[in-house]
Image (spheres, grey):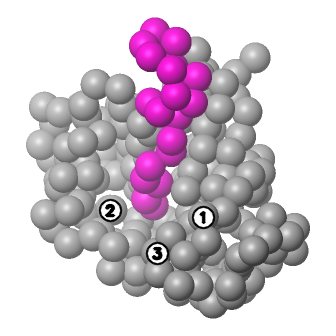
Amino acid sequence: MIITELRAGDRRVRKQAVEVLMAAFAAQGAYDLGAARMEVAESLQPGHISRVALNDDGRILGWIAAIAQYGEPPAVTGWELHPLAVHPDYQGQGVGRALVADLEQQVTARGGVTLFAMTDDEDGRTSLSGVDLYPDPLAHLQTIRDRGGHPFAFYRACGFAVVGVIPDANGRGKPDIIMAKRVGR
């Protein structure tokens, strides 16, 4: 596996990135073809990082991107990881971890010190779903549990910490869990 930059001029790889994004999020119904194409195109804009993991045949196994969120170039300190997509045939084989590690290096090289991810729970995969998190969301965060393959467990395994929650971000009982990690020196 090789991890490299997703280039705007490589239509074949861009098309594969769209396909991987749709396949990875098919169960959530998060992306139709138009939305997936837009997501990939946006990742190629200034202030973004876009990387792909390719197999020996040049086929995409996974794709990761990040958006500069805090600070101004050249001193962007905070980057949002969005999105991370690994083709279902390659999930659980280290592709996602390798993409996250590579992204950490890319963010560090650009002077970043924090990488964060927003992990929606719209389908009951954590103990925060279906619960009224008000008036004390932080108390609920102390006992957060994975109920079935939620991304927060993956990010924790990659060294991210749960740093917050936005209750009802996706409707009542459907929070957005905020994960973050210090990167760099």
Residue denoted by label 1: 166
Check the image and report above or below for 184 versus 48. above
Residue denoted by label 3: 170
Q: Which residues are magenta?
A: 68-86
Q: In which quadrant of the rendered view does residue 46 lie?
A: top left
What x and y, as percent, mark residue 167? 61, 71
* Residue type marked 3: Asn
Which disc, if any, is residue 73? none
Q: Quadrant of the C terminus?
A: top right
* Residue type marked 2: Val
Residue denoted by label 2: 20
At x 40% / y 69%, what residue is drawn?
A: 24
At x 58% / y 22%, what residue is drawn?
A: 77
Q: How many marks?
A: 3
Q: CA distance from mark 3 to mark 1?
A: 9 Å
Camera-nearest label, 2 or 1: 1
What x and y, as percent, mark residue 53? 43, 45
